[in-house]
């Protein structure tokens, strides 16, 4: 009974102490799988790899992984801001495209009225054409330059470019914007441009193209401010809108002083909008401070709407 309970003692007596030492050594269990400690239901338990493989009743420990995209999305682009040259190139491409399409359209209209119809441009036709350009010039722009939703603005709700960010306390009520653009700014632009066409007898002329440049810059600014939400670049963009309007008014004044004064009057509203955009930039800083006044890599993705890269709804 004693030897049965103590097999090493029996081996030592019969085969010597060396054999007993070899039997008790860890090398005797070299092919036995080592045990591992795992946590199951918040308790530490000993399992060997084979038992974990064979026993399906053991709980599976979930493994959490983080994709490169999600980890990179948490990187603050303003920590080391880099100029987004790709966005600038796309803005320039969109501007050239829009101006070229306007020039081609006006050239066709001049040929139609001069060579085909052999008549002067009717004032009502010019008014309606330029009123449409004032409100929908973006149809010639390949970027996504949607405006804030008018119905939501009237109801005081947020939409792209309006109440979707921290706004200044002196921001006009939402109903003010559609009233100004549709009922005041649009008709003034259309009437003053029609006066220029009546004076020059042509759509394709320097003053009208200066006005189209103003609309084109405004469309690109809408992309920057409303769609991409680049608060810093929007400040420089709206200043370009103001300067282009002043240039167009100056070109108008050289042909028809009254038309120049009319278009120049819209600068009052544009300067108010510029002050609003600048104050909005101040109220929406990044963790590092005020957002740079240029497009920054990583803060937005500039894409061409014409090629199916836009998922946003137009107004």
Image (cartoon, grey):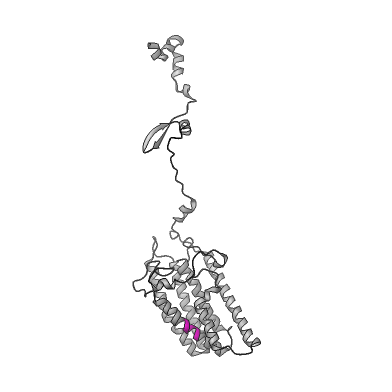
Marker count (numbered): 0
Q: Position of residue 52 (x, y in %)?
A: 46, 33
87 or 102: nearer the eye?
Answer: 102
Vertically, is 133 above or below 24? below
- Residue 94 position, x and y percent, is 55, 71
Residue 211 belongs to the span the image colors magenta? no
Q: Quadrant of residue 226?
A: bottom left
The reply, left or right, for residue 284 in relation to residue 216 is left
Q: Is residue 189 magenta?
A: yes
Q: Position of residue 310 (x, y in %)?
A: 52, 65
Q: Tell me which segment is drawn in magenta.
A: 186-191
In the rendering, at what x and y percent does residue 280 appear? 39, 69
Q: Is residue 178 visible?
A: yes
Q: Is residue 279 above or below residue 252?
A: above
Q: Nearer the viewer, residue 78 or 96?
A: 96
The residue located at (43%, 77%) in the rendering is 178
The residue positioned farthest toward the top in the image shown:
14
């Amino acid at each position: 009974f004693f030897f049965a309970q103590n097999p090493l003692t029996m081996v030592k007596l019969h085969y010597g102490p060396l054999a007993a030492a070899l039997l008790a050594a860890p090398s005797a269990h070299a092919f036995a799988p080592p045990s591992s400690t795992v946590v199951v239901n918040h308790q530490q338990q000993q399992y060997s790899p084979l038992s974990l493989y064979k026993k399906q009743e053991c709980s599976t420990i979930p493994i959490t992984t983080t994709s490169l995209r999600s980890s990179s999305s948490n990187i603050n682009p303003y920590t080391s801001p880099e100029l987004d040259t790709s966005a600038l190139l796309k803005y320039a491409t969109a501007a050239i495209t829009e101006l070229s399409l306007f020039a081609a359209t006006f050239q066709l209209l001049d040929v139609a009225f001069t060579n085909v119809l052999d008549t002067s441009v009717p004032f009502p036709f010019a008014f309606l054409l330029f009123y449409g350009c004032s409100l929908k010039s973006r149809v010639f722009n390949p970027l996504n330059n949607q405006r804030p939703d008018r119905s939501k603005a009237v109801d005081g709700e947020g939409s792209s470019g309006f109440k979707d960010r921290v706004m200044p306390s002196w921001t006009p009520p939402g109903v003010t914007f559609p009233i100004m653009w549709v009922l005041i700014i649009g008709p003034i632009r259309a009437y003053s441009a029609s006066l220029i066409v009546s004076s020059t007898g042509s759509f394709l002329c320097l003053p009208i193209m200066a006005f189209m440049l103003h609309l084109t810059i405004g469309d690109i600014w809408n992309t920057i401010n409303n769609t991409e939400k680049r608060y810093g670049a929007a400040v420089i963009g709206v200043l370009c809108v103001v300067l282009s309007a002043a240039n167009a008014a100056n070109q108008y004044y050289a042909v028809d002083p009254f038309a120049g004064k009319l278009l120049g009057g819209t600068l009052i509203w544009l300067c108010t909008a510029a002050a609003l955009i600048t104050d909005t930039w101040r109220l929406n800083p990044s963790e590092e401070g005020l957002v740079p006044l240029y497009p920054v890599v990583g803060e937005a993705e500039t894409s061409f709407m014409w090629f199916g890269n836009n998922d946003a709804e137009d107004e």
